[in-house]
Image (cartoon, grey):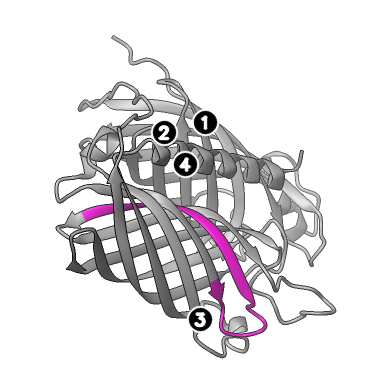
Amino acid sequence: MTLRKIIIEYVSCILCSSMTVLLNAQETSWSVETSLGYALPHRSEMLAIVTGHSRGINLRYGTWDANGWRKNWSDHGPVWQGIQVGWLNGGSSELGKMASGIWLVALPILPNWHVELGSGLAWSTAPYDPVERPLSIAIGTRLNAAIHLGSTAQLFQFDKGWVALGAGITHFSNGSLALPNLGLNNVHVRIRGGWKTKKRITSHIPLLADNQNDDWRIAFATRAGARDINLPGGVLHPTVSAGLYAQKRANVTHAWVLALDLAHNQSLRQFSTNSLTTLQRLQFSSLAGINLHFGRGHLMLLQGWIWTQPDKSLGRRHLQALFSYDFNQKWAIEMGLRSFRLRADYPFLGIRFQPDKAH
């Protein structure tokens, strides 16, 4: 089974788990939104293919609730969690169109004002093709990952509905599993109309016991990924890594993280005129950041620095974004992406182990 298929199955499991929660949640809602935006030309090569405004339409189904893990985020109101199905016209024939399915959570930071986080999968109608679409350098494959960050304010509220105005950015990319892959960053504004349905009996997935305390907790992780650095159709170069984490809970919603990472990057040999030994392919990094808690799910954002054997074309400073799901108190599965200045380096899958606290 290829890494791409494993990633698809993992994301599918997350989406299915989310739907199980939605069907048993307290108060459901539907909404429809339309958006107008612009594909951010974050690389000079994209200036020629960004020729018009992007336009999109999305359908959302989800739930409002303030129980379970969502209670930790509900100081200013209930938390919304749900699924978004969308269609986006990128604004030019080279960018094409995107059909997407994204799991989303909307966290209230003020009454009637939410910050949105989401991830899922997207299908491109215009991936790169050396013959038919030689200028479609933003997306290299049909199937891609989708990551969303946004903010929404409710302008009007009715008995069973609302109207909201928002803005955000949605990133589409295959994580450099196939080149070219500059990525598509759609910055947009949107207007949404929604309505709530009748309440249902709540039946939450059991939460794990909360280990909130003031002490540092240690965890270990092993990961595997792949990177394409050649021309389209090139060989995928494997990466394997081991990580050490130290986390300190700040409160029920997040923890501060310090980490060390040692990665064997097979692609480094392509940038050397001489053959490299195993030690010369090892990249040692230190990282620091935050881990956001959503029940069994977690989103970790880490800023890192590579101390040994950096890729000179990318530099040393990088961002590592990981989503993890806890099977129990000790074991979790991870899916993440390492990137440099909005440029994907490689995606990875991993397993994390957190031993019991020593007494």
Q: Are marks 4 and 1 in contact (CB under 8 Å)?
A: no
**Label 2, on which residue?**
245
Decide whether the magenta segment is chiefly helix, strand or loop: strand
**Residue 54: assigned label:** 3
Q: Quadrant of the C terminus?
A: top left
**Residue 221: assigned label:** 1
Span of residues in magenta: 88-108
Q: Mark 1 belongs to which amino acid?
A: Ala
Position of residue 175 relative to residue 336, above or below, is below
Percent across and percent down for residue 310 are 59, 55
Between the residue at mark 3 and the residue at mark 2, the CA separation in whole angstroms equals 40 Å
Q: Mark 2 belongs to which amino acid?
A: Tyr
Is residue 220 at least partly visible in the picture?
yes
Looking at the rendered image, the disc whose residue lies closer to the viewer, 2 or 4, is: 4
Q: Mark 3 belongs to which amino acid?
A: Ser
Q: Is residue 239 magenta?
A: no
Looking at the rendered image, the disc whose residue lies closer to the viewer, 3 or 1, is: 3
**Label 4, on which residue?**
19
Q: Secondary structure at mark 3?
A: strand
